[in-house]
Image: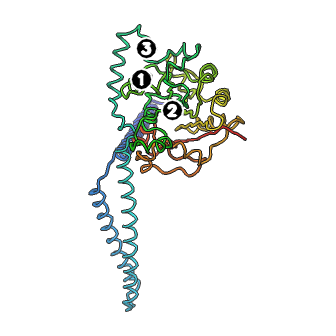
Amino acid sequence: MNNNNIDTVREEYRITTIYLGLVASLLFIVLSVHTHIYICIYTSYKMATFTADDVNKQIELYREKLEQLKIKKLKKYDNINNNSNNEKEREAYIEKLDNIIETRIIDAESKANKLLQSQNNVNKYNPYKVLNLSDDKKLKKKQEYHNKNNNNSNATNNNSLNKDTTTTSSIKWSQLFENPNLPLVIDAGCGSGKFLLRFAWEGNINNNNNNNNNNNDISIKNNNMNFLGIEIRKGLVDIAMNYRNTLGYEKNVCYIHSEFNTKFILENLSKYPGKVNILCCQMPDPRFKKNMKRRGKKKLTLERIIQPSLVSAIGTVLDPINGVVYVSSEYEEVHLDMKECFLNNKKFRLANMTEINELYFAKNSSQYHTCSEANTESTNLISNPFGCETERELYLRENKQNMKIWRMVFHLNND
């Protein structure tokens, strides 16, 4: 190969390299622009809020576009029927177009009003405002400071039990509740404990009705039940206890630091003097294997809360007549796993709607029913059956409105 051919090959190679580089750069720019546009659209949609004036402006713009479309259609009609002198047919056609415009405007207004109503409900309703509790962030900072300066403080002083001792020694129920013979409501994985406090603040709706003869205030504290929150994260237990003490519910509300497992049920709940009526496991940690590997030494446990052995243990402590279990999750995989654990156990069955409706404890003072659809099918619960969202559900409603939550209520099988 002579020198001229070598130079030609080199030049072609150089031009090809430059061309490929330009193509790659162009593709990168296009992808970057598309990604940026998508992020902008998604962010604006997620954060967008509308007022009645905004809706009216959009409706007027929509009407103008429909009127312009009407003019185009009339021109087309006239061109097709230019030889026809039938004015009645033309007037009928115009009336038809006007009816279509009005129908579409009415439909648009209806959808806009539903959007405004939903937005107002999402932004305004919070079931925990009635408790008038302090900001979580302030409490957490205060608790962190307290833990740093009181390393030798004993959790038993505020009825919060140490995780290790809780699962190995029996709980003294008389130290937790003033009257340990009352029916017990349990929230496993209770977080900062607000759900149980709201339950205790309002009381079961049936008990409230019984007391209405003596007290017309439906927001009375329910002294006819005990409430136990179980949480594996010590900091959240301390926050929950602070909340409880603030509200003055020391007699019938308590939170303990423990893992909720079969051993805890058999060694502690089985010895509860009263009846265990309700057990909740709401929005538990999904504990996906990929997440557990990433957590490393910080992981709490690899197993999910609901296990076949745990379900069997629950069946031994629940009240055989009124005992129910409520579970929920935003992850379908976790939902199906929990459903399988309960329905494969002969002790449990899905609760019917009559049994589910009896759980609704905030019927008269809660706005929850105005911003959520009513449950009509026991196999498809689209709202929290207690009428009070958990803090996690509240977060999802405000930030991820299209997030589906799977809910189930199980009843002991008395057949």
Residue that numbered label 3 is attached to: 157
Question: In the rendered view of the protein, which quadrant contains the C terminus?
Answer: top right
- Locate residue 85, reporting x and y percent: 37, 92
2 or 1: tag closer to the N-terminus: 2
* Left-right relation of 160 to 65: right
Q: Which mark is residue 61?
A: none
* Gap in angstroms between the C-alphas marked 2 and 1: 18 Å
Q: Nearer the viewer, residue 178 or 18?
A: 178
User: Residue shown at 33%/75% (left/top)?
Assistant: 71
Mark 3 vs mark 2: give the one in front.
2
Q: From what the image shows, is residue 187 above or below residue 95?
A: above
Mark 1 closeness class: few <14, some 14–19, many ≥20 residues within 10 Å: many
Residue that numbered label 2 is attached to: 225
SS at badge 1: helix
User: Residue shown at 57%/37% (left/top)?
Assistant: 326
- Locate residue 331, reporting x and y percent: 54, 37
Q: Which mark is residue 241?
A: 1
